Image: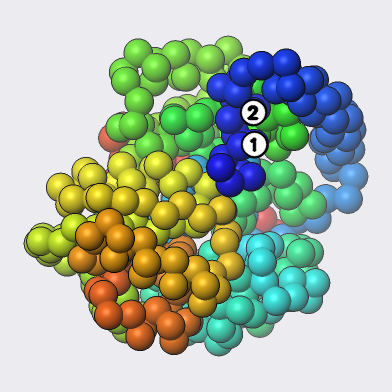
């Protein structure tokens, strides 16, 4: 069992026995220290200590748990809507797994990519690839990135990618994504659970977006909304699902061609993913009616090697798979590897979008309202 899977089994309580109990106890002590540090940090920012305000409106898209909640497709949705309002947004990303995020780097300028995924990290590059007129800037100091976006790129609104805990830059709207399949991070902060900060931090949110709501029963969804109402009263809650936009070959994805929603592929698939919740991707593939006979789940933000590609091929051959299907985030890395293009087996990609089940007009009204603000 991989380390990440073992960790989740432990903190979720699924791992049983005396050793598991001792391990959870030790992690609980570390969590107390982490929670105290997060609380002290939040108290400082609540007093606006060390907070910078940009010269244009700022929208933050983030979450309170570690792992995939759908930030990338949501940031893309927000920016595409802002583009439809004739605005010039810029995404400010930390640049996770970038070659160097100490300095501010322009990943894309109004939709034109300027660096490779190795320089920017896969998530920031993916946003730059998928947005037509939005700029993407990475850097640890997002106040500095904001200056570059406004002064150099001419952006008139900023979108913080994974910005809920990055409080050095003031924001006009805090959108918090809640994964319906694991909404509260096992009720413990890291490392005893998956919470990035104590749950009372949710009171800072302006809008909750429940994601992947089709992956839980209605009564569970009701319970999540009820608890959110107790933790952070009177904050609007909207509901979404991750909608597959179709399927395309890795080559057509690289060429930025549109996915074909009705593409029929009579393959037996091996799914390959290195994301926070690989079971979510498997659910997506199954929901499209494709046959999955085996899954290879690498750790979140996995850096693929030639040995991994050999493993993909061997697994596909051993299980009788006739094609491989992967996520967009994984496609960023795999597309850079010659070994993948040399595989004697088709490789497909499934781009994911956001579909609102409830509250889309309310959500758009919040975005539009921020876009009309004048921060000067």
In x, y percent, where is residue 132?
39, 75
Above or below — where is 87 with respect to 253?
above
In x, y percent, where is residue 241?
33, 40
Does the image show residue 28?
A: no
Numbered badge on residue 10: 2
- Residue 104 horizontal side relative to residue 288, left or right: right
Q: Determine crowd level at label 1: few under 14, some 14-19, many 20+ residues with C-alpha closer than 10 A.
A: some
Does the image show residue 49?
A: yes
- Residue at 17 percent across and 52 percent down: it is 290
Quadrant location, the C terminus: bottom right
Q: CA distance from mark 1 to mark 2?
A: 5 Å
Q: Secondary structure at mark 2?
A: helix
Numbered badge on residue 196: none
- Residue at 74 percent across and 34 percent down: it is 190
- Residue 298 horizontal side relative to residue 248, left or right: right
Tell me if label 1 and label 2 are in contact, CB under 8 Å. yes
Above or below — where is 56 with respect to 293?
below
- Residue 113 horizontal side relative to residue 248, left or right: right
Residue under circle 1? Answer: 7
Q: Secondary structure at mark 1?
A: helix
- Residue at 34 percent across and 56 percent down: it is 271
Q: Determine crowd level at label 2: few under 14, some 14-19, many 20+ residues with C-alpha closer than 10 A.
A: some
- Residue at 24 percent across and 61 percent down: it is 321
In x, y percent, where is residue 120?
62, 75
Q: Nearer the viewer, residue 150 or 43?
A: 43
């Amino acid at each position: 069992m991989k380390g990440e899977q073992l960790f989740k089994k432990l903190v979720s309580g699924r791992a049983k026995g005396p050793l598991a109990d001792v391990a959870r106890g030790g992690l609980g002590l570390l969590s107390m220290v982490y929670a105290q540090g997060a609380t002290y940090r939040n108290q400082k920012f609540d007093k606006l200590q060390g907070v910078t305000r940009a010269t244009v409106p700022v929208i933050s898209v983030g979450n309170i748990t570690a792992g995939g909640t759908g930030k990338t497709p949501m940031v893309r949705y927000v920016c595409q809507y802002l583009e439809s309002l004739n605005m010039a947004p810029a995404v400010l990303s930390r640049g996770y797994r970038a070659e160097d995020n100490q300095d501010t780097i322009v990943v894309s300028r109004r939709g034109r990519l300027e660096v490779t995924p190795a320089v920017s990290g896969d998530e920031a590059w993916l946003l730059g690839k998928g947005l037509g007129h939005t700029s993407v800037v990475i850097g640890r100091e997002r106040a500095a990135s904001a200056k570059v976006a406004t002064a150099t790129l001419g952006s008139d609104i900023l979108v913080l990618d994974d910005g809920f805990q990055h409080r050095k830059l003031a924001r006009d709207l805090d959108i918090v994504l809640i994964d319906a399949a694991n909404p509260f991070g096992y009720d413990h902060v890291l490392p005893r659970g998956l919470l990035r900060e104590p749950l009372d931090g949710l009171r800072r949110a302006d809008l909750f977006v429940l994601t992947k709501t089709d992956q839980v029963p209605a009564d569970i969804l009701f319970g999540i909304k009820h608890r959110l109402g107790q933790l952070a009263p009177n904050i609007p809650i909207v509901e979404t699902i991750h909608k597959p936009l179709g399927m395309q070959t890795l080559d057509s994805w690289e060429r930025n061609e549109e996915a074909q929603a009705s593409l029929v592929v009579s393959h037996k698939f091996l799914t390959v993913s290195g994301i926070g919740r690989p079971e979510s991707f498997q659910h997506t593939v199954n929901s499209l009616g494709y046959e999955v006979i085996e899954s290879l789940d690498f750790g979140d933000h996995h850096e693929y090697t030639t040995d991994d590609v050999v493993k993909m091929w061997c697994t596909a051959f051993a299980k009788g798979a006739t094609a491989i299907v992967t996520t967009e985030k994984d496609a960023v890395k795999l597309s850079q590897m010659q070994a993948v293009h040399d595989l004697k087996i088709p490789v497909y990609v499934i781009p994911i979008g956001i579909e609102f089940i409830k509250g889309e007009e309310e959500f758009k009204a919040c975005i539009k309202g921020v876009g009309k603000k004048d921060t000067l």
